[in-house]
Amino acid sequence: MRKVAVIGVGQSKFGELWDYSFRDIVLSAGIEAIEDAGLEGREIEAMYIGNMSGGRFLAQEHIAALIADYSGLAELHIPSTRVEGADASGGLALRQAYLAVASGLHDIVIAAGAEKVTDVGEKAVEILSSGLDREWEVFNGVTLASLFAIIARLHMDKYGTRAEDLAMISVKNHKNAVRNPKAQFKREISIDVALSSPYVAEPLRVFDCAPVSDGAAVIVLASEEVARKYTDTPIYISASAQATDYIALSSRRDFTTMDAVVFAAREAYKKAGIEPKDIDVAEVHDSFTIAELLAYEDLGFVEKGKGAELIREGVTELDGELPVNPSGGLKACGHAAGATGIRQAVEITLQLRGEAKGRQVDAETGLTMNIGGTGATAVVTIFRR
Amino acid sequence: MVGIVSYGTYIPIYRIKTEEIARIWGENGETISKGLGVKQKSIPNLDEDTATIAVEAAREAVYRAKIDPTHIDAIYVGSESHPYAVKPTATIVGEALEVGNYYFAADLEFACKAGTAGIQICYSMVKSDMIRYGVAIGADTSQGAPGDALEYSASAGGAAYIIGKKGVIAEIIKTVSFTSDTPDFWRREGKPYPKHGGRFTGQPAYFRHITSAAEKIMEELDLKPSDFNYAVFHQPNGKFPVRVAKMLGFSKEQISPGLVVPYIGNTYSGSSLIGLAATLDIAKTDELILLVSFGSGAGSDAFVLRVTDEIENFERKPGVWEKIEKGVFVDYGMYVKLRRKIKMGD
Amino acid sequence: MLPRFWRKIKYRYNLIGTKCENCNTYYYPPRNLCPKCRRKSKIVEVKFSGKGEVLSYSVIHEAPENMKDQKPYIVALIKLEEGPIITAQLVCDSSEVKKGMKVKAVFRKCGEEGSAGVIYYCTKFVPENL
């Protein structure tokens, strides 16, 4: 397998983008990435696009051809493929693009992620629940938030995690987002505000839940040789790993561990030849605050049950030993379903390049972790300068 | 011998007091409660309807009967609040009971006596050896228009009876019906609430039909009120059954075990059948029971039942009165939510 | 949705799941293949007693469109006495519910496709002492 580098990144603003269509936001991210890579466009050999539910958010399938077309690539006739794994779609697209370059099939490949959710109004939350087991979970009345709430309650019972710990994660992510011009919520919140916000699904409150956002992110991957022609600061993907688990939470081995994350992380560390302690910065899937806390444990940053210690001790703060979600994460930067996995990779690339401006951390090795639904799909990617 | 092999009942957990309803309409709750003989009534939960009540009652009956559900060859569900105007409740019950697919089924409607009409159908089918066991259910989530007198009594509940030849706990000795075209109470197609003829529902409707059916069956069997251990009359409120008992010559003691309406309201198709269940809960071998239902429109089905010694080994717990006592009281606001009287957004 | 629901009525109206006779593991929802035995799976249908206990739960305040009139309502992970853990609604007051609570299955309405549409029924749970 060949070494693969990120040579360009771009991202639309995340949030409620009333003025912009699906095509508009994908294009804005795409143009930024192409410019960042210094490409003309003709060099692109293939595209992989993460999109969770164009069919239900936009009544638009055939997303891959649509995006290739509006990216001005129709007459190049390149292969363009949509990849879906609920809100891990972006992470999966990144992995497919990585494999296409690593295998030697292509030299320059686009990995994109895009979702336009605000056109369907309140239905968006219900559509996001299609990443769960529709027949045996959603039909029985569960929501995505309620399943994470069930996990949170078990973690609290078993390990003494408190609502305050979860709120601190939200506070941290909001604080980070203030320094991210592309973030949806650029305002700090206090722990009291988080803890007094209304319940969504007990014990999770409004500030424990990521928003449902519009957004797109694009990265350009190239083989090591080709990358050198385009950039002086290539960021290498040193491992990409993916794992699955039972789709329904109720079937899982342990409700407070995401085995798919554990397995993907283990394989990624092995491939990269590193250990969890070698990670300097991480973007993890905090669709709910409890998910970030589980990520601390399942990625091996701390032993099982002690996730709360990392937030209590400030380890994962921007100025901590291991900053997590410097972008503001899904909670405050925004969660645009299929775009999230790519957006995380954009952030880590910027951090490793030293281009993260006001939220820059000191890092050589970074990690992204993207999950679908309650963790039936997990993708872990490790990046190095 | 053809008769009742088993029975089961279901009463939703929520209750509202007559005073609470009266408070909203500026009426004197105590006066109304005394006048109607209804202290409180049952309310279905948001996820309960006639089908769920019918299933729960029928499941209890099948469990107590200890019979193979595939031996049930007929299901009739009587109600004036079937969840669908077109599409049977009986098939939902059949599927939930796992009776298989070869069974006779239909929904019945005859105001408050559709359940006893179902018993008559099952009785004839068993007697003619068309079927082994038949399930007759009377269940309702009845509606009274807000502010109408019916709002104080229209409630929810149901009872299921398994009719057969084997393991009979109460033999059906005879049944007769008295029927006439008397529009005392009705609900037109597509209308949410019924209308009624006020005091016309009394003498020409309830009293005439019940007394005629009761007198006819006693005459044919050469029985008099004092021959019976118990009597159960349809219970639209707490007053009518007491008065009709007196008119026919039955004592308070004979009717009181089955007089459930003061505590759960009028469960319509379930009403006399829950009353019968409460009576069977305490009945002993060889005791004689008179059951007379009444359905507006109008008709009364009378039954004479003789309890057999099979009842001694029959599982009767939890009893009807135990279920009645388990109520959780709610205020009118909650009642309005539970009965879906709030206009929700689309 | 209609045929999709109808197809599985048997498993929704009653708690009918599956058992792998090769490893004696019970499953609900039903599975066509045992994840432990795969090709050696010997799947048979079984009816569960409907008794179980609450492992964890959540009171839902932000409800999907078709459940809005029922909020707040409770969903729970329930461990059936035969072993499998299932996701279901728990019908009781939210102040009553607690971990380890014994529950039993009941037949309830689960939803409807608008006021003119088909009604769906399913199995939910209530406290065992009810």
Image (tube, coloured by chain):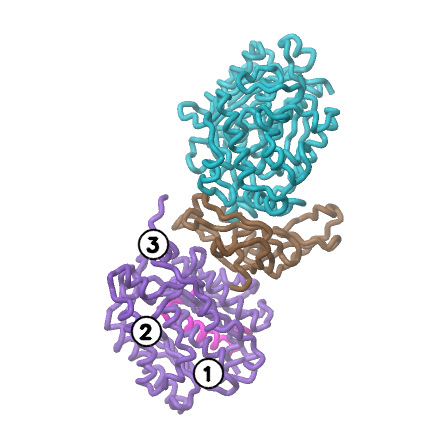
Chain colours: A cyan, B purple, C brown
Is residue B306 a member of the stretch shown in magenta? no
Q: Residue at 48%, 53% (x, y): give it.
A: C94
Rendered view: A192 above or below A251: above
User: In the current view of this chain or complex, which residue is farthest to the front?
Assistant: A313
Foreground mark, 2 or 3? Answer: 2
Rendering coords of residue B203 (x, y %): 26, 78
Mark seen at residue B305: 1
Q: Is residue A38 above or below residue A272?
A: above
- Badge 2 and badge 3 in a common chain: yes
Three-letter code, disc 2: Gly
Give the extent of the magenta segment: B107-134
What separation in Å lies between label 2 and label 3 (alpha carbons)? 25 Å
Chain letter of mark 3 equals B
Give the image quarter of residue B84.
bottom left
Q: Can you tell which of label 1 and label 3 is closer to the viewer?
A: 3
> Which residue is at the front of the view, A368 or A24?
A368
Q: Nearer the viewer, residue B80 or B238?
A: B238
- Protein chain holding label 1: B
**Residue B37 circle label:** 2
Residue A93 visible: no
| Residue A147, x across and y down, in percent | 55, 43
How far across and how far down the image is residue A77, in percent? Answer: 57, 17
Name the residue: 37% across, 43% down.
B346
> Relative to B241, is B286 above or below?
below
Can I make out residue B30 in this image?
yes
State the SS at label 1: strand
Q: Is residue B287 left or right of residue C81?
A: left
**Chain-order first, disc 1 or disc 2:** 2
Mark 1 residue type:
Leu
Q: What is the crowding at mark 2: few (fewer than 14 residues within 10 Å), some, or many (at least 20)?
A: many
Q: Is residue A125 left or right of residue A262?
A: left
Q: Nearer the viewer, residue A69 or B317?
A: B317
